[in-house]
């Protein structure tokens, strides 16, 4: 062997090391992939949310604005001149009491002005003005600033009337003057100085236009120069009066059924009972509330805010989002067959075999509801034109054609979206009160689909 070959070593095949797989890493990777798939599936799936039916009541808005209708008689100025009041607004005057004077020369107004500069109001008068200011402060709404200016005018008028009333004895010396006319009440009643032109309004004449464009109240003040036949004052001599409110036909029916309702006046929180009469004027629905007291308290108000304190509706409370409508075929009740082992019975349907020969088959129809005349059956069990035979009456056949619609919810108790008919008693913007203990209806603690639009009839559902 040569020297060159002495350094040669044995050469063998190279074996690669086997790949050592980390089982824990593989499992973690698989779990991560599964998690990603589940997350994607969760967000792509339309979720069905349940709602548990419970008993409850609705907070219904019962606040209305109405028009007051009274027996009020307007009187006009007896002549031209300066008008000065001696009766206080809202005060009850007897037949023959002095109400106002008309002074053509201005002498009475001048004397009254002189007397006011030298005279202070009595404690009783100051208490009366203070009461008016406190009442205004309680009722003031910053969103209606015009009421502040109206009150300013009323307060100034009241002050003048109080001053005039206190200096009445000083005016006897001019009572016989040819330019002065003292006017006395022709009958007893409550004096009101404002007029809005609706003194002769009748309940049957009320329209929505009177609410949309409110009548403006105008009141003459002491010291005003008036013309003959201008409005001077009016008398209210009867405590029987009415308030007419605009209302929905459904709500009107509820109030009419009650016949008498308790009413709270928002102006002073006073409560009173009223008799209900429904009116249909100019294609609109109104309710006339008749009172036998409190007329004088609101003698100066034409538009009155009040709350009808009718008992709240109670029953099963469900969200409006869970309510949906469904179409049904109608089958007369006399065609129902109570047999064949079906819990609710069914119907004997006439069908045909492959050769065209007539035969009969029992169809439970899946009854959802029943009124006095018809059963409401599933449209998936029949089709228009199907023939139903009357039990024990040969030749009596009903051809399915009539349809109707019912409101309902999807009941989840059986694991699928089972349409259940409901009867809505009352409804607000978010919830409905439905009748409980009905034959085909819901029961307390049933689970329903919160969003009825998220499922289809008979779809499998999971809470």
Image: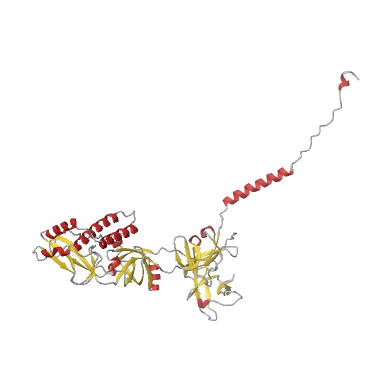
- Outermost residue to the top: 3
Residue 116 in which image quadrant: bottom left
Q: Is 93 positioned to the left or the right of 255 in the image?
A: left
Q: Residue at x 51, y 61 (%)?
A: 322
**Which of these two is toward me, 392 or 438?**
438
Q: Is 360 positioned to the left or the right of 99 in the image?
A: right
Residue 377 appears at what percent x and percent y?
Answer: 52, 70
Residue 299 appears at what percent x and percent y?
Answer: 27, 66
**Which of these two is toward me, 77 or 151?**
151
The colour mode here is secondary structure
Residue 438 appears at what percent x and percent y?
Answer: 52, 72
- Outermost residue to the right: 1
Number of marks in the rendered image: 0
- Which quadrant of the rendered structure holds the N terminus? top right
Q: Residue at x 29, y 55 (%)?
A: 148
- Which quadrant of the rendered structure holds the C terminus? bottom right
**Which of these two is toward me, 405 or 33?**
33
Inspect this view and state whether residue 148 appears.
yes
Q: Residue at x 32, y 59 (%)?
A: 134
Inspect this view and state whether residue 224 appears.
no
**Which of these two is toward me, 408 or 108?**
108
Residue 127 in which image quadrant: bottom left
Residue 341 appears at what percent x and percent y?
Answer: 61, 75
């Amino acid at each position: 062997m040569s020297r060159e070959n002495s350094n040669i070593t044995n050469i063998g095949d190279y074996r690669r090391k086997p790949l050592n797989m980390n089982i824990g890493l593989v499992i973690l990777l698989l779990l991560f992939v599964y998690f990603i798939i589940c997350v994607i599936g969760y967000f792509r799936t339309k979720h069905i949310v349940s709602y548990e039916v419970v008993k409850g009541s609705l907070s219904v808005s019962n606040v209305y604005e109405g028009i007051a209708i009274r027996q009020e008689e307007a009187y006009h100025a007896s002549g031209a001149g300066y008008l000065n009041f001696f009766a206080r607004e809202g005060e009850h005057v007897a037949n023959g009491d002095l109400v106002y004077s008309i002074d053509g020369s201005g002498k009475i107004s001048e004397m009254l002005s002189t007397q006011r500069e030298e005279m202070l109001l009595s404690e009783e008068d100051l208490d009366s003005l203070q009461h008016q200011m406190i009442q205004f402060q309680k009722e003031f709404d910053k969103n209606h600033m015009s009421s502040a200016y109206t009150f300013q005018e009323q307060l100034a008028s009241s002050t003048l009337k109080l001053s005039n009333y206190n200096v009445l004895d000083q005016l006897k010396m001019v009572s016989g003057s040819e330019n002065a006319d003292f006017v006395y009440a022709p009958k007893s009643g409550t004096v009101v100085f404002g007029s809005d032109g609706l003194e002769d309004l009748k309940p049957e004449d009320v329209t929505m236009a009177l609410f949309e464009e409110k009548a403006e109240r105008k009141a003459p003040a002491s010291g005003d120069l008036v013309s003959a036949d201008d409005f001077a004052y009016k008398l209210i001599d009867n405590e029987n009066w009415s308030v007419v409110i605009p209302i929905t036909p459904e709500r009107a029916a509820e109030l009419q059924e009650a016949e008498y309702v308790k009413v709270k006046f928002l102006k002073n929180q006073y409560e009173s009972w009223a008799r209900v009469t429904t009116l249909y004027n100019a294609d609109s629905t109104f309710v006339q509330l008749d009172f036998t007291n409190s007329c004088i308290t609101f003698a100066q108000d034409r538009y009155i805010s009040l709350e009808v304190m009718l008992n709240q509706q109670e029953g099963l409370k469900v969200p409006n989002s869970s309510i949906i409508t469904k179409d049904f075929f109608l089958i007369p009740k006399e065609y129902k067959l109570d047999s064949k082992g079906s819990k609710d019975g069914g119907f004997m349907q006439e069908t045909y075999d492959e050769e065209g020969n007539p035969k009969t088959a029992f169809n439970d129809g899946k009854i959802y509801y029943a009124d006095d005349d018809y059963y409401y059956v599933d449209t998936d069990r029949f089709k228009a034109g199907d023939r139903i035979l009357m039990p024990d009456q040969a030749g009596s056949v009903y051809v399915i054609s009539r349809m109707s619609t019912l409101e309902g919810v999807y009941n989840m108790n059986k694991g699928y979206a089972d349409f259940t008919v409901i009867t809505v008693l009352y409804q607000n913007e978010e919830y409905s009160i439905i009748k409980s203990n009905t034959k085909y209806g819901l029961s307390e603690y049933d689970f329903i689909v919160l969003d009825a639009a998220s499922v289809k009839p008979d779809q499998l559902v999971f809470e």
